[in-house]
Image: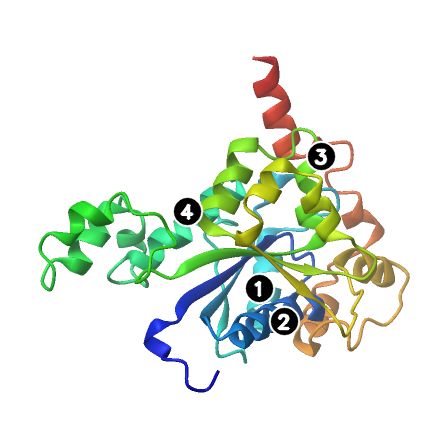
């Protein structure tokens, strides 16, 4: 593996979407486990990890404001040299499908200046054209229709736990064409938690089975069952969450008194945004 040519390795960006309500040490571990997995194959080089908290319009029960969730995620990753937080998704006024977030980050990677938000808003072909203008005059025409997994452009893969993968079967939570594009053009990196039979779930789905080579299953041998739900429950009961979340996150939660029985009732009785949207689409 040491003799592998770094130039021949496929570059990968790991994107994690979710509530991060709040971010926990488990969320951060997902990135480390996935990076170890890819590097151990000798075929990939993980160049970046991105945490993209969902916006308030998702309407999940107990979801506190995106401002606080993004701030906590930024505090948690402050000392990381490769995982960062992106607030584009959380700043949208409407809920965004995960596929749109994947597309956005792929486009952003192709932009000549990823820090320029104006450039990011341009169509995919424009930044690609500028990027390749000088060295290869005819490349833009080809680049326009190339899939995200071409050599030369980093692959943006969706990093998730087995619970997200298994949520694909919940009626009206995902669009079939979105799942197809995610597993076909981008790929999944699924960290399996204890007690989840992810391989069986993939076997039972014709769509996932067809694209199983683009679904990377990572075994979590040092099991970790921390979840945001359990963190919020502990906080409501006045119990310690130390060593379950980064110290800076714990301090921020305490300073702003973020999780309470009242906050847990936020959006109670409100239909989750995707369920509302897709159920409505189905009727029409």
Q: Which mark is residue 71?
A: 1
The reply to whether dot 4 and dot 1 touch (C-beta < 8 Å) is: no
- Inspect this view and state whether residue 71 appears: yes
SS for dot 1: helix
Taking the spot 67% from the left edge, 46% from the top edge, the residue there is: 202
- Residue marked by disc 3: 170
SS for dot 4: helix
How crowded pointer 1 is (Cα within 10 Å; few <14, some 14-19, many 20+) is rated as some
How crowded pointer 3 is (Cα within 10 Å; few <14, some 14-19, many 20+) is rated as few
Side (left or right) of 146 relative to 129: right
The reply to whether dot 3 and dot 1 touch (C-beta < 8 Å) is: no
Q: How far, Cα to Cα, is label 3 from label 2?
A: 27 Å
SS for dot 3: loop
In the image, residue 109 lies at what x, y percent? 34, 59
- Mark in the foreground, 2 or 4: 2
Q: How far, Cα to Cα, is label 3 from label 4?
A: 23 Å
- Residue marked by disc 4: 103
In the image, residue 193 lies at what x, y percent? 76, 61
- Residue marked by disc 2: 33
Kindly indicate the quadrant of the structure image that contains residue 76: bottom right
Query: Closest to the observer: 6 or 119?
Result: 6
SS for dot 2: helix
How crowded pointer 4 is (Cα within 10 Å; few <14, some 14-19, many 20+) is rated as some
In the image, residue 36 lies at what x, y percent? 58, 75
Furthest residue to the bottom?
2
Which numbered disc flags the more N-terminal residue, 2 or 1? 2
- Mark in the foreground, 4 or 1: 4
């Amino acid at each position: 593996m040491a003799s592998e040519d770094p130039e021949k390795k496929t570059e990968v960006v790991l994107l994690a979407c979710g509530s991060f309500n709040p971010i926990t040490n488990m969320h951060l571990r997902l990135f480390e486990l996935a990076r170890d997995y890819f590097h151990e194959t000798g075929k990939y080089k993980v160049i970046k990890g991105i945490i993209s908290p969902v916006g308030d319009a998702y309407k999940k029960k107990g979801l506190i404001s995106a401002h606080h969730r993004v701030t906590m995620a930024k505090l948690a990753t402050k000392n990381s040299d490769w995982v960062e937080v992106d607030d584009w998704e959380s700043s949208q006024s409407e809920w965004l499908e995960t596929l749109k977030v994947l597309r956005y980050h792929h486009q952003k990677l192709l932009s000549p200046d990823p820090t320029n938000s104006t450039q990011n808003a341009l169509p995919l072909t424009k930044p690609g054209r500028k990027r390749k203008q000088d060295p290869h005059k005819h490349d833009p025409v080809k680049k326009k229709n190339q899939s995200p997994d071409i050599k030369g452009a980093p692959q943006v893969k969706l990093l998730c736990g087995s619970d997200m993968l298994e949520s694909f079967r919940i009626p009206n939570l995902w669009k079939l064409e979105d799942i197809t594009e995610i597993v076909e053009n981008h790929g999944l990196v699924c960290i399996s938690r204890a007690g989840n039979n992810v391989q069986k779930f993939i076997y039972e789905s014709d769509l996932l089975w067809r694209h199983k080579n683009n679904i990377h299953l990572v075994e979590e041998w040092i099991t970790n069952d921390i979840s945001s739900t359990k963190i919020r429950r502990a906080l409501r009961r006045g119990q310690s969450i130390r060593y379950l979340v980064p110290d800076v996150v714990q301090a921020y939660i305490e300073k702003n008194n973020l999780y309470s029985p009242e906050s847990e009732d936020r959006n109670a009785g409100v239909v989750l945004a995707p369920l509302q949207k897709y159920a409505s689409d189905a009727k029409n």
